[in-house]
Structures are given as C-alpha cells and as structure tokens.
Image (cartoon, helix red, strand yellow):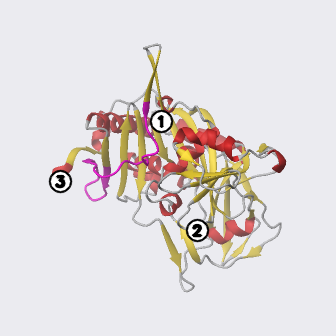
Amino acid sequence: MANDLIAEISRLGLEDLNTPASASITDVQHLSSYNWVEAPKATPTIAVPGSPDLWSPPNRPFRLEKDTGHIYIAQNAARHPDSPLEPLFRALYVSHPSFDITSIDVVTDRNNIRKLLAFVNPRWNSYKREAFTIHVEVTNNTAILCREETKTDEYIGPNEFRGYGHSFEKNCTSRKVSGSTGHHRIISYRFGGLTFMIRHETDGYVGVAGTQLSPQPPANQAPELDDLSSILGSLSLSPESSTPGKSSLVGPKLVTRKEGQVVSLPSTLEIKTRVAHRPLAFEDVVSQLWVSQTPKLVRAYHNRGVFAVPKVEDVAVQVKTWEDQNQKDLRMLAGLIGKIREMVKESGGRATLRYNAIGDKLGFYKLGGKQMLPEGFKWEEHKDGGNEREYSC
C-alpha cells in the first residue's frame, strides 16, 4: 500500500492550506429526495420524491422495548453495493432532467464532510480519532466522494443492548411511504467558494404549521410509463415492466418508483435518544445538523426505557451561531476539500483517502477498479456555439 501513496496531509499541514476568507453555508436549495423501500434483494427499489416519516409522538410518558433485529448503518451501500451513489443521481435527474452537473464542485454524503471536519478538529467527533476511508473521483471539475464502511448493516440479537433509537423512531413517527426503510434528501449550497451537493438521511418532519408539502398528482393523473421513461431515458434507463410509474437501469437493477411528497427543509428534524443521566450536549450533534442544514432537533431522554414526553427544538439560530464562532475550523475544512479536489484531479482523477488515526495523517492513494457510477451514466460533452459546454449523466 505504501507504494501506492500519492501524498499525505498532517493535521499541522492544514495550516499551510489555501483557505477562504470566510466559510459560511449560503444559497441552500432542496434538489431531490427518495426513500428506500422493501423489495426483493435482486431488485433494489427507491421511491421518488419519497417522504420522511411524520413526527407524531405520544403526549404522555411511554415505555419502549430496546432495539433488536436488522438495522442499516449505511443503507445505500447495503442495498446497492455496486454503486451506492447511483440512487442520488437517479433521484436528481427524475426531479431535474436537465440538471447541469458541471455547476457542482463536490458531490458527497454528509458523513464524509463530518469525517473531514473531525480530522480538522477532533473536538467535533468527541475527541475520538477514528480511521476512515473515502473514495474520490474527479471528472472535469466535479469531485464525487463515496464513503467506505467496514459494515453496512448489522443484526442486534435479543440479548444485546444498543439503545432505543430505532424503537423510538418507529413509535414516535408515522410512515408516509409504504414499505419505507429510510428517507434521503439531496440539497445544494455554496460553502468556501465551492458548490456542494449533499446527500443525507432525514429522521422525520414536523407537520401542521410550517410544513409545505407538494403532493404527487392524483392517481387518475399519475404519469404513464412512457412519460416517466422519457425523463429517465437520458440516464440510460429503460422500462422493465408494464407497471405505470416504474422503470429500471439496464444491467444493475435499480427500480425507480414515483411516490411521496416533497417536504420542505425547514420542517425536517434529527432525532437523538439518550439515557436521562447523560444529556446530549448540542456540541455533540451540531456538526451533523450544520452539514445538512437540518433546523430541528429532538433530544429524547429515558430512564430504563421509559421516555419523557419528547419536544422538538428549533435550533437553526444555534447552528448559525456555531458556524460564526468556528470559522477557523470551517475555513480549514473548506481549504482541505478544495485541496482534495485539486490533488485527485492532478493525480489522474481517481484516488482513495485514508485517515490513519495512529499517525494522525490523511493519505492519498491510487484508486483502481471500477468507476463509482455504473456504465449507464456517461459524462458526455456537448458543444454549443463552439464555446459553452455542458455535461450530462
């Protein structure tokens, strides 16, 4: 592996990076969303735009059973291991068929940004130094970051204890998409002189006041197969069945189903559970909220499985205050991401980032093997008037 090393960055080396004068998130836009839904393993299926679960907790204290059974750690990789990023692009181009991917500098999951921020300052991971691996591809000027996990899912046995988080979500939210096993959102924003496209999982949303829903057409006005296929056709998709509203990728089978409602970003929330005598500090969750610009937080506390009535906190102002107060770390984060994009592009366009927790260094290694996106996605150059160029996936 040492022979494949391209370069290294130490924590002290971060001081030498070219950093922007300020590093604040601006121009936040919701682009698309989808839910993974239960389906046979051979036909992984997403519903677009899908919907997060609706926040609907009991109005009095309640007891829950501990988490058991199958849970996902990285659902996109678990359900579609050949191309964990493919669902992101499928959902994006269903929502925006003519989206110009060259307008984006960095495409990534929230988790990758959090790991890089923890490298900048371990404080944002509770001072834990944990090894991580991120694969990077740069095409033209767009960098795509894909997380690598040692485990993508696991089974919690009846004699194990891992807390109450999944049980809490199941009992305090109402599913809005049939068979859903998780909702993912895709947003874009400007940060540190770069335009980001971020994918992240959303635990739920708050209904009633403040929620804006964009329902799908009534059943008698649902798009026919040919209509949906015309959108997906540019992505090398073709219909696999005569069922209206479904089509799939030729080769690796990723079925796309049109179902759900678009839920506005201001109504989305993150859910955390903790034992009552160990309250969750805002500092321990703020970086997660910041990367995805999630404005609401539920910190639910229990005593041996008995939960007090949970409350939703509007933390948007606190998140912004944290951003303003931690500009040194965030400017360094922006500089690091820019350096990663630059170095990978100069090294052939493909590399693996590995953080060595013992050496406290981030290494760049040559990346071989298959491309991150399947063959059905092609970055094709189109010339318009001999000057302007655009690329489509």
Task: Tell me the crowding category of disc 3: few under 14, some 14 to 19, or many 20 or more residues within 10 angstroms, Cα based.
Answer: few
Q: Residue at x 67, y 79 (%)?
A: 65
For the residues bearing labels 2 and 3, Cβ distance under 8 angstroms: no
Could you tell me which secondary element the residue under label 1 belongs to? helix
Could you tell me which secondary element the residue under label 2 belongs to? loop
| Residue range (magenta) | 353-380
Find out whether residue 371 is within the magenta segment.
yes
Q: Which residue is mark 1?
A: 327
Spot occupied by residue 324 in the image (x, y as percentages of width and height): 54, 35
Could you tell me which secondary element the residue under label 3 belongs to? helix
Identify the amino acid type marked 1: Gln
Numbered disc in front, either 2 or 3 = 2
Spot occupied by residue 129 in the image (x, y as percentages of width and height): 37, 58
- In three-dimensional space, the C-alpha distance between marks 2 and 1, rounded to whole angstroms, equals 46 Å
Task: Using the rendered image of the protein, determine whether residue 24 is visible from the camera's viewpoint.
Answer: no
- In three-dimensional space, the C-alpha distance between marks 1 and 3, rounded to whole angstroms, equals 34 Å
Q: Earlier in the sequence, mark 2 or mark 3?
A: 3
Q: Nearer the viewer, residue 131 or 393?
A: 393
Q: Which mark is residue 40?
A: 2
For the residues bearing labels 1 and 3, Cβ distance under 8 angstroms: no
Q: Earlier in the sequence, mark 1 or mark 3?
A: 3
Q: Is residue 40 left or right of residue 242?
A: left
Spot occupied by residue 242 in the image (x, y as percentages of width and height): 67, 54
Identify the amino acid type marked 2: Pro
Q: Nearer the viewer, residue 209 or 199?
A: 199
> From the viewer's perspective, is residue 62 above or below residue 260?
below
Q: Earlier in the sequence, mark 2 or mark 1?
A: 2
> From the viewer's perspective, is residue 67 above or below residue 309?
below
Q: Which residue is mark 3?
A: 2
